[in-house]
Every structure is written in C-alpha cells, then in structure tokens.
Amino acid sequence: MKRFIIFIVFLCFSLLQIATICSAQAQSKTKGFEYNEFDTQKDGPSFEFTKPTSTIDQNALQITPDNQNQENGYYNKSGRIMYRDRYTLWLSDRDEIASFNTNFVINMYRETTWEPGEGLAFLIAPSYDVPVASYGQWMGITNETTDGKPENRIVAIEFDTRKQDFDPDGNHLGLNINSVNSSKTVSLSEFGIDLSQPDRKHSVWINYNGKSQELEVYMAKEGDAKPETPFLKELINLRHFVERVSYFGFAASTGDPGIQFNCVTKWNLEMEVLSSEKDWKWLIIGLSVGVSTSVLLLVLSGIKVRGFYLKKKKNRARDEEAGVTGKLKMLPGMPREFKYKDLKRATRNFHESMILGKGGFGVVYRGVLKGDDREKASDNAVTQVAVKRFSRDNIDGKEDFLAELSIINLLRHKNLVRLEGWCYEKGKLLLVYDYMPNGSVEKHLYKSSDGHTLSWRHRYKILAGVASALHYLHNEYDKKVVHRDLKASNILLDSDYSARLGDFGLARAIENERNSYNELELGGVPGTLGYVAPECFHMGKATPETDVFGFGAVILEVVCGRSPGVKIQHEEQQFTLVDWVWMLHREGRILEAVDERLDNVYEVDEAKRLLLLGLACSHPVAGERPQTQAICQIIAENMPPPRVPPFKPVFMWPSSSTAFNSVEESGNFSKTWSL
Ligand SMILES: *[C@@H]1O[C@H](CO)[C@@H](O)[C@H](O)[C@H]1NC(C)=O
Ligand SMILES: *[C@@H]1O[C@H](CO)[C@@H](O)[C@H](O)[C@H]1NC(C)=O
Ligand SMILES: *[C@@H]1O[C@H](CO)[C@@H](O)[C@H](O)[C@H]1NC(C)=O
Ligand SMILES: *[C@@H]1O[C@H](CO)[C@@H](O)[C@H](O)[C@H]1NC(C)=O
Ligand SMILES: CC(=O)N[C@H]1CO[C@H](CO)[C@@H](O)[C@@H]1O
C-alpha cells in the first residue's frame, strides 16, 4: 500500500513536470537582441560591416561614413551592417513562417547646406556583402546589373530621401523586393515626418506575422509612441522572396550631390524560433526529465528535508545553475547528465595518473564508471569514459561549454568521437566522451610500447577517416564547423584502427567567430604550432582552410613519422617538416620522406599521392589549398594527386608591411604574434 501511494505521488510529479516542460517549450520560443546603443569593442563582433565604409561610431551603426576623413569623404558610398548570426525563417519540413518584431531608431542627419541623399533600408538578405557600385540610387541593396533579379533574395524596407524617376518623392518609405524600385511606397510628408530634416531621429517598428503573412511598418519621431495604425501594410509570403536562413541588418548609400549620415542608434529584434523537433520528442524529454526530477524530489523530501534550509547565496548559485541546466535540457537529443560525484570518483578525484591529454580550455581524464553509476549497464559492468574538465569555471567557461555542447551534440559521424553526456554542478563544467582505449595516433607513431609501428595500411586508413570526418564537419552540417585543433594527439584510434577525431574543445561554428589564436598563446599549447596555418597569426581566426592546413601537417606526420613541430637537420641546414618534404619533392626524391620504420613496406603510388596531397594542403596561400571534397577523392583514388610546384610559394599577407617569407622560416613564433 505504501508503495502504491509513493507510485501515485511519483506519477503526479511526472505529469506535472511534463506539463511544465511542454508549456515552457510552447512559450519560450523567441530569440533576438536589444541594443540601446552600440559600442565598437563590445558589440562590433556581433555584426558584419562593409569595410571601410561602415562602422560603429558615436554609439551608432554608421552604415555610410559619418566622418569626412573616411576615405575620400561622404560621396558615392554604399554599405551594409548585418547582424552576424543568421535567422531561420522557416523549416524545410513545415509551412509555417517565423514571426518577428523589430524596432529601431534611424538618424539620417545632414548639414543644412547638404542636399539629402540617398537612403537607408532595413534588409533581409542572403549575404552581408554589398554589391559593387551600389551607391547612389541603389542604396547598397542592388546595382545596375542585379536590380530586379529574383536571385537577389532580398526584401527591404527603404527610407528614401532622394527622388528617382520611379519614386513618388524624396521623403518616403517603401517595400522593396529584390529591387530599389519599390513595389509599394508611402509618402511620409502626410504623416508629418521629414526624414532628412537635419538632426531628427525616427523610430521604426516592423512587425511580421508568419501565420497571416502580414507585414506592417510603423513610424514616429523618436520619443513618440508607436502609432495605432501602420503606415504600410502588405501581405507578403517571405518564402517566395528570401532565403530560408537569412541575415538581418541595414544597407544605405550616399550619392553625388546628395549626402547624409545613415545611422541606426538603437535596434532590437525578436524572432520566433520554430521548433524543429516533433512534439513527441518533447514529450519524451519531458517524461524523462519529469521522472528523474520526481525521483530526486522523492529522495530529497524523504532524506534531506533539512537540506532545503540553505543560505541565500547558495540558492542564487543554484538558480543560475538551474538556468544553464535548463538550457542544456532544451537541446534536442541531448545526451545524459552525469553526477559530479560520480565523475569525481570515476577519475579518482581527477588524479594526475588519469590524465589522457590537455586540450583547449581543459584537461581530459580517463574515468572508470562502475555498475550502478550507469543506469543501463549491468551490475558489475565497468565502463571507461573520457572526461573533459573545463579549466575555466567562470562565465567565459560556461559560454565555451554551451557553445561546445550545442555543436558537438549535433555531430554524428563514424570518425568523430561520440559525446556520452555532460555534467554541470557546483560551478564545474564537464563533458563525457566515449573512451578510446587505443589512444592517439601520436602515441602509436612515437610511443608504441611493443616497438611496433603503424603499418602502411593502417596509416592510409587513418588519414582517409580523418579526411572524411573533416569533410563532414565542413560541409554536411548546416552550420560550418571548424575543428581548429587538428593534430596527431587529437586523432584517436578505435579497436580496428579507424580514426576518431576528438576534442572539439575549440570547435566553433564559423558564424560566431569567437575563435582567437591568442588563446593558443595564452594557454600555451606549443606542440600545436606546427599545425597552425600562417594566416592564423594575422587573422587570429580559424577557417576550413586552416583546418586543411592542419590536415596537411597530419598527412606529412603520419607518412613521414616525424612531428611537424620538430626541425629536421639535413646537410647542415635546418628544415621544417613541410620544407624538407618540399625540398625532396623538388629534387625528385620525395619517397625518401617516407617513415624509415616502415622498412620499405608501403605502396609507392599511395605514398606519393599522400605526400603531394600533404604539400598541397600546406600551401601558404589559404585559397590555393584543396577543399575536403577533393581531398577525399584524392585519397579514394578517384582523382589524380594534386600538382605541386617545385618551390614552396611565398606566404604574403596583404595587410602586413613587414617582409618575411613564411612563418616557418622566421623561426621565432613569438615574433609573429605582434604583427
Ligand atoms: C559619383 O558617381 C558619379 C556617377 O557614378 C560620378 O559622375 C561622380 O563624379 C562621382 N562623384 C564622386 C565625388 O566620386
Ligand atoms: C553589380 O554587383 C555585382 C556583384 O557585386 C558585380 O558582379 C557587378 O559587376 C556589379 N555591376 C556593376 C554595373 O557594377
Ligand atoms: C518600377 O516598377 C514599376 C512596377 O512596379 C514599373 O511599372 C516601372 O516601369 C518601374 N520603373 C523603373 C524605372 O524600373
Ligand atoms: C623570440 O622572440 C622573443 C620575443 O621577441 C624573444 O624573447 C626570444 O628570445 C626569441 N627567441 C629566439 C629563439 O630568438
Ligand atoms: C589499434 C590498436 O591498438 N588496437 C588494439 C586496441 O586495443 C585492443 C585491446 O586492448 C587490442 O586488441 C587491439 O589490437
């Protein structure tokens, strides 16, 4: 009987939880931002700018220059400032379009002596690149060649201060679809608004209802309330005109003689997030979370009633933790949560002897989970896992953690190490991966305990696997993912010598470009340097091309059995691995680069193919490196090996006045940091 009551209580808790989770799901479906002013340092990274025309200055987005000194003044300029993250307007398998509301303040300031021109527009566009020669009447939206073409995939609301042949006047707003010739215009003078009155700011509200497909535009002088009725109202099915995933932002232009500032001083956007998960999935998540929480509640209420009387401080920390944990639980298909206590025990209190490796942002430990630590494992089973503990437990770390989690959570590939679960407790962030008992390629190349070295067959298979994983990361996932830290110690082996790419600690979707190589400098991961592309030191940014460079280093390392970070002494000269192989290639004896420990047991054609590919990937110019598609085909022998010039091309960086040939040859990496 007692059991039955417990069961009923349990059931009620579960249902309550399901209801809460489902309703939370139904409500919390918007995302967006709010800027009451703009700061170059703080907010700059969230936007894409047309350089050098568009900037943040005077706490505003300056879409065209606000400064006479800016490269020959105010005339004939066009630019765009777009929010860096794109938004999804509809899902491929659904009819529904996302609704959005946006509110911004524009300031089209001009001196009284200036003739006004040309205009500013709110833009939904597939790209942040401004078309060539889009100044003057084209408003940074189109140009003479592209205007009116459906391929533009642009919908805009223009605020036009200069009359063209097709305009009603020089003071109107308009709905622009792929063209500056508006499909609908509204003259603003009748509403008492004069856009180009010197020094007057205006608030704009744009509301789009994805269900009714109604687009409404409201305007008022800044400080005045939003009017009751819209200035412009139009039915528009955005699916017909813009990309499913689009950028939001602003475009503007000046002409000759018409000039003005085109700036935005405030901007907020609220966007509906369409749920990609079928409803039953939420039910399952709700159910599982509900069940586990109620179990927890039962245990708590039974055992630790006193535990609730905690100090306020602790409660706040817990609330914050609950916030993050809540977010994690919202992630679709999120793997299981581990208890800190269990992971601590599994790693023998994060003992040094359990360390598997150190990567960006943290240390990876081996963990041994015993029977009841894993719900599903049978009683006596022992499971090994790799536990990554983040080195930074502060706010930064939390963001890194969430970024890493949301990305790797979506990655599924046979050559990637699988994520098992996560833990966020007591301010500690932990990720749990599959344990790869056979260790890394680095270990197998250099530290094999039984004196055996990797056979040629295995080396080829490993490289093919890594290429395939890289191709997946770069192409098959809808947000491009760069690995950022490709190196032999990050390539793990499973029991049949298949490569598994691990440690996405530094993986970042390209779009949120928070990846800085300064972290390398600070965190000090010197072994990684041989794998880092020269342009990284200038851009401080990882791209698919820098990953390919890293892969080139891995190819050469695996074929030659030499670390890219170690110099090679050859006839009184010191070479980096790449330069050494390149020299042998030039002298027609590239096969001498193959690892001697193979005792000549390898395929000559395959070795040549890989070495040439390795050199091609190491090209100092990022744009000249092969892409992963070609790399996979070359490895699969569906494509001939790349042609490699006899001399390594010289690395040049356009923005750098310091002359040096390549990072490799400069010999002192710390010098290049300051460039
Ligand atoms: C602006 O462009 C127009 C035509 O494209 C040209 O005639 C004019 O000289 C340009 N003005 C300036 C200041 O560059
Ligand atoms: C219009 O823009 C496109 C893309 O930027 C460019 O290729 C084209 O040459 C431009 N047309 C003119 C007339 O400048
Ligand atoms: C502008 O578009 C209208 C139809 O929307 C068309 O009749 C007119 O010719 C166009 N004008 C120019 C200059 O392209
Ligand atoms: C490299 O450069 C740094 C900073 O300029 C300097 O402190 C260091 O001694 C240099 N190392 C070598 C090997 O030249
Ligand atoms: C590639 C490799 O080293 N494979 C080994 C992995 O570990 C298992 C068990 O220890 C061995 O049987 C494999 O040969």
Image (cartoon, rainbow, N blue to C red):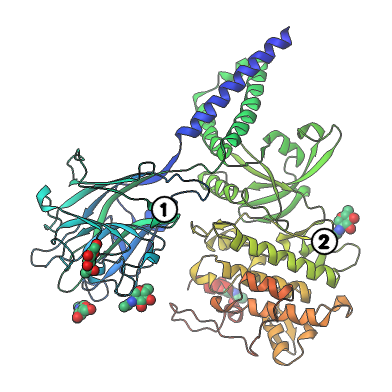
Q: Earlier in the sequence, mark 2 or mark 1?
A: 1
Residue denoted by label 1: 239
The N terminus lies in which quarter of the figure?
top right
**Among all residues in the image, which is located at the extreme left?**
113
**Among all residues in the image, which is located at the extreme bottom?**
587
Within 8 Å of ligand 5, the CB of disc 2? yes
What's under tag 2, amino acid-wise? Tyr
**Location of residue 98 with respect to 468 vertically, above or below:** above
Q: How far across and how far down the image is residue 481, in percent?
A: 58, 59
> In percent of the image, x 64 and y 52: which residue is there?
411
Q: Secondary structure at mark 1?
A: helix
Q: Quadrant of residue 140?
A: bottom left
Answer few, some or many: residues within 10 Å of disc 1's Cα (few below 14, many 20 plus, some between 14 and 19).
Answer: some
| Drawn side of residue 175 relative to residue 554, left or right | left
> In percent of the image, x 87 and y 34: which residue is there?
380
Please state which of the two labelled residues, at mark 2 or mark 1, is closer to the viewer: 1
Ligand 5 quarter of the rendering: bottom right
Q: Secondary structure at mark 2?
A: loop
What's under tag 1, amino acid-wise? Arg
Disc 2/disc 1 C-alpha distance (Å): 47 Å
Q: Quadrant of residue 469?
A: bottom right
Camera-side residue of 55 and 226: 226
